Image (tube, rainbow, N blue to C red):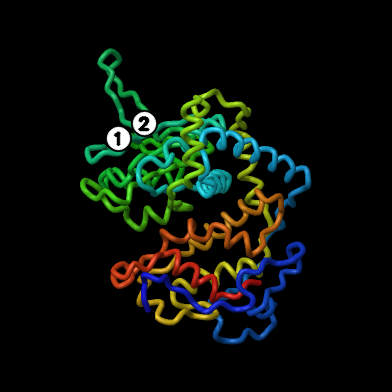
């Protein structure tokens, strides 16, 4: 099995096909998933990857056509502003907007000069939010980003000076250049939406989003991000070079000053972002799609309905339950951007690489043979039947 040629499993007839028509409201499961069991049914053995709900959940308010129309208009305004400052990079645009409305954080990886910082500035401008950029260096301390207490000699009291993490959008430039102690200071902010200074809790402004960048080709003076912190990022987007045509367009727009000209479209408000996040949570996810997501995640761990042969030779640790939640949440965001109030399997597949590539811990053999995480993810999705 050669890693240089990728790693794939034999696809089947049902893989990758989106559910036709609308979402099934009866909760029926797709092909390969059996039927939904009731309390009195005999549950067959051998399906640990397909858990049944313990109880019925409360009904969520449905999304109306007015909601989808308003959401489409808001997302269109964000895309228009993004397109004025960033040429190409459609994958980056989709990842940033999806992360924003899904309420997560994103990790951007690329060589220098591919508009990571520009994209972060543009996203902040598109949502009328406060923006702070933190340049990570080895001597950066936790207090430099969280905040600290300052003694006032005139009053004899301590006053709290909040750090730059207290903003709607925070850019952590070259996050892997900061020490592990400083990186750990971001965990509370990213996971809990708050910071602790002098024993007091300071909530972060809402909405709050972290955009972290790292350069994969420089190793001197860098610290590898721990897996616990990597798992906190909803997505990891890997940027590639623009096409020759896009690069010519970049030069043309730079020469004409269009990239630095005032924004033509009006930005959306922070309340609009909160509204979009609330809508994402209301996008309907059928039980069969949830079981499909669980099957995918379990397949990355060596289980699932169709376990991949020799997976343990390439993957040491598969995706966690947080990965399953991320797949569902991102699929809801993708569906809303597509103008739908329900999720189809193609929504789960759309950003699969960005959601899962940083959640798989590869073995030393996989690293030595250049087995890309994207190839493993594609093999998992090809092996699991879609509903």
Q: Which mark is residue 163?
A: 2
Q: Residue at x 62, y 72 (%)?
A: 386
Residue 281, percent across and down? Answer: 63, 51
Q: Is residue 142 above or below residue 19?
A: above
Q: Say whether disc 1 or disc 2 marks the residue closer to the N-terminus.
A: 1
Residue 282, percent across and down? Answer: 67, 52
Task: Report the quarter where the C terminus lies.
Answer: bottom right
Task: Report the quarter where the N terminus lies.
Answer: bottom left
Instruction: Give the SS element for disc 1.
Output: helix
Q: Residue furthest top?
A: 154
Q: Is residue 122 above or below residue 114?
A: above
Q: Residue at x 54, y 60 (%)?
A: 327
Q: Is residue 322 above or below residue 36?
A: above
Q: Quadrant of residue 172?
A: top left
Distance between mark 1 and mark 2 Cα atoms: 7 Å
Q: Residue at x 48, y 61 (%)?
A: 323
Query: Dot 1, crowdedness within 10 Å: few (<14), some or many (≥20)?
Result: some
Which residue matches tag 1?
A: 143
Residue 370, percent across and down? Answer: 34, 67
User: Is the residue under label 2 in contact with that under label 1 (CB below 8 Å)?
Assistant: yes
Q: Quadrant of residue 294?
A: bottom right
Front-most of residues 232 and 199: 232
């Amino acid at each position: 099995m050669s890693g240089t040629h990728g790693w794939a499993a034999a696809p089947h007839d049902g893989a990758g096909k989106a559910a036709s028509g609308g979402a099934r409201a009866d909760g029926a499961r797709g092909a390969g998933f059996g039927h939904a069991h009731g309390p009195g049914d005999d549950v067959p053995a051998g399906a640990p990857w397909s858990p049944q709900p313990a109880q019925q959940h409360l009904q969520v308010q449905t999304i109306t056509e007015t909601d989808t129309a308003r959401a489409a208009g808001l997302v269109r305004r964000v895309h228009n502003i993004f397109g004025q400052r960033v040429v190409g990079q459609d994958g980056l645009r989709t990842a940033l907007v999806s992360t924003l409305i899904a309420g997560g954080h994103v990790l951007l990886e690329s060589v220098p000069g591919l508009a990571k910082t520009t994209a972060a500035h543009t996203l902040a401008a598109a949502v009328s939010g406060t923006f702070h950029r933190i340049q990570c260096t080895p001597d950066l301390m936790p207090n430099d980003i969280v905040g600290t207490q300052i003694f006032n000699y005139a009053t004899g009291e301590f006053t709290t000076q909040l750090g730059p993490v207290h903003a709607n959008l925070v850019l952590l430039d070259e996050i892997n250049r900061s020490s592990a102690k400083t990186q750990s200071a971001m965990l509370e902010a990213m996971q809990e939406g708050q910071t602790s200074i002098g024993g007091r809790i300071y909530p972060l402004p809402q909405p709050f989003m972290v955009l972290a960048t790292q350069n994969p080709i420089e190793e001197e003076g860098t610290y590898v991000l721990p897996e616990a912190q990597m798992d906190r990022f909803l997505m990891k987007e890997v940027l590639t070079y623009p096409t020759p045509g896009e690069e010519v367009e970049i030069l043309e727009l730079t020469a004409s000053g269009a990239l630095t000209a005032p924004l033509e479209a009006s930005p959306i408000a922070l309340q609009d972002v909160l509204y979009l996040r609330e809508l994402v949570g209301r996008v309907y996810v059928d039980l069969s799609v949830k079981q499909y997501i669980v099957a995918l995640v379990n397949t990355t761990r060596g289980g699932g309905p169709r376990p991949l042969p020799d997976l343990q030779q390439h993957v040491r640790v598969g995706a966690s339950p947080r990965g399953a939640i991320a797949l569902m949440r991102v699929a809801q965001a993708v569906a809303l951007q597509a103008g739908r109030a329900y999720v189809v399997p193609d929504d789960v597949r759309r950003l699969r690489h960005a959601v899962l590539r940083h959640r798989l811990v590869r073995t030393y053999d996989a690293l030595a043979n250049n087995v890309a995480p994207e190839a493993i993810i594609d093999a998992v999705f090809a092996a699991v039947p879609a509903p």
